Image (spheres, rainbow, N blue to C red):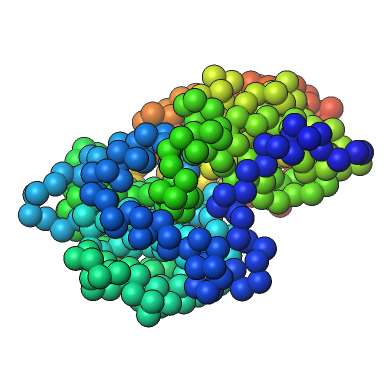
Amino acid sequence: MSGPRPEVLAKLTPVLTRRWLEPDAWRIETYERLDGYRALRKALAVHPDDLIALIKESGLRGRGGAGFPTGMKWGFIPQNDNKPHYLVVNADEGEPGTCKDLPLMTHDPHAVIEGVIIAAYAIRANRAFIYLRGEAVNAARRLRNAVAEAYAAGYLGKNILGRSFSLDVVVHSGAGAYICGEETALLDSLEGYRGQPRLRPPFPATHGLYSCPTVVNNVGTIASVPPIVLGGAAWWRSMGTEKSSGPMIYSLSGRINNPGQYECSMGITLRELLELAGGMQPGHELKFWTPGGSSTPMLTADHLDVPLDFESVAAAGSILGTTATQIFSQHDCPVYATYRWLKFYEHESCGKCTPCREGNYWMVRTYRRILSGQGTYQDLDTLLDTCDNILGRAFCGLGDGATSSVTSSLKYFKQDYLDYIEGRKPPLLSAKELVGAH
């Protein structure tokens, strides 16, 4: 296969990833040599409200999955309320297939730190927390080292760079619960409670950490702030689409020749990403894929030319999510893939609400029956009915996300289910694995 076409290569826009391959990229000396902390000096010279206006004008949207406008979220924080304000960075990356935040924190931690300082200044916060997934030991070490370097250089602490603004940053490692990626469960965990989602309203903007105004942003969102401050809103908008501006890190995995992180202008298609990644592996043809992790409805080869931005993916019936693009071929079974994802969601359910706790438990057992050759036609109706009772009725997005692969796989690949039920496909699970399914 020949290399990518020039027009496809032009869609590679390394902004957040441009320092990753530098020797000692995580050290402050390297970061400062490559424009590091220049944006902070520029930000501290303007009024905080001007920074919020800049982020709004840039069109930056959350990189954690929901795509909520970042400037709008910052603007929700009430001012002159005589309460402390907090900034919390959601670094609890744990969804199957999602892997863009860990390399960001590991290879370029100071980009996150600088973004934290600018965001905290904008929302008038003097304390910030980076909540990191407990298993991410190396990233935690890099972040803590970067925080120590930033304190030593005068970028953190009292009167930063001679200004009246002060900020302390805490890197907190969680205990490895997927539910803590949900922002209110994260806040409860940070306060020392069991990580479970809160009832909303009230929202974190007014009643967040310690019942005070709080902004919760994803790692990629925060790391995007310094480039926007340096380059300006128009430059950021020159990449991406009108409503989904800027570059995005697309994490490609699966049946492709060159899996990895590809930072491209939003709106690139899977066909173009596959071209950049060297195409499908020999003997494999695209069958199904996820645009944003296991909690987003799967798409098929018919969606190769859907622009990968928030609006276009939603119009195609899925969610852009975390742009964790998992690629599956004709040698992969959508029924078995859904079963494996459901096992994850069953295990990670916090148990607070009945639809998610019970629904995922019973759906896993239904899939075991189908994959062991003991399924019935009624099982398919049961799966859809269970999803209908979870979607929109669960306490948080974990329950909703768990239904995505079930409903989408039944929509596009019902025949694969029928092949197991009618005996055309041999069972994938043994009788031993079926124990506990009834």
Q: Is residue 130 visible?
A: yes
Q: How many marks?
A: 0
Residue 347 or 170: which is nearer the viewer?
170
Residue 23 lies, with reference to residue 38, above or below; the image says below
Quarter holding the C terminus is top right
Q: Position of residue 98 (x, y in %)?
A: 58, 49
The spot of residue 304 in percent (x, y) is 72, 26
Left or right position of 98 against 152: right
Decide which of 260, 326 is in the foreground and name it. 260
In the image, is residue 18 above or below residue 409? below
Residue 197: give x, y in percent of width and height: 32, 47
Residue 136 visible at all:
no
Residue most extreme to the bottom: 152
The structure residue drawn at horizontal position 70% and vertical position 32%, both measured from the top left corner, is 270
Q: Position of residue 332 (x, y in %)?
A: 78, 38
Q: Residue at x 59, y 68 (%)?
A: 25
State the quadrant of the N terminus. top right
Residue drawn where x is 84% and y is 27% of the image: 424
Q: In percent of the image, x 83 and y 47: which residue is there? A: 257
232 with respect to 364 (left or right): left
Decide if residue 411 is on the left or right side of residue 120: right
Q: Nearer the viewer, residue 35 or 141?
A: 35
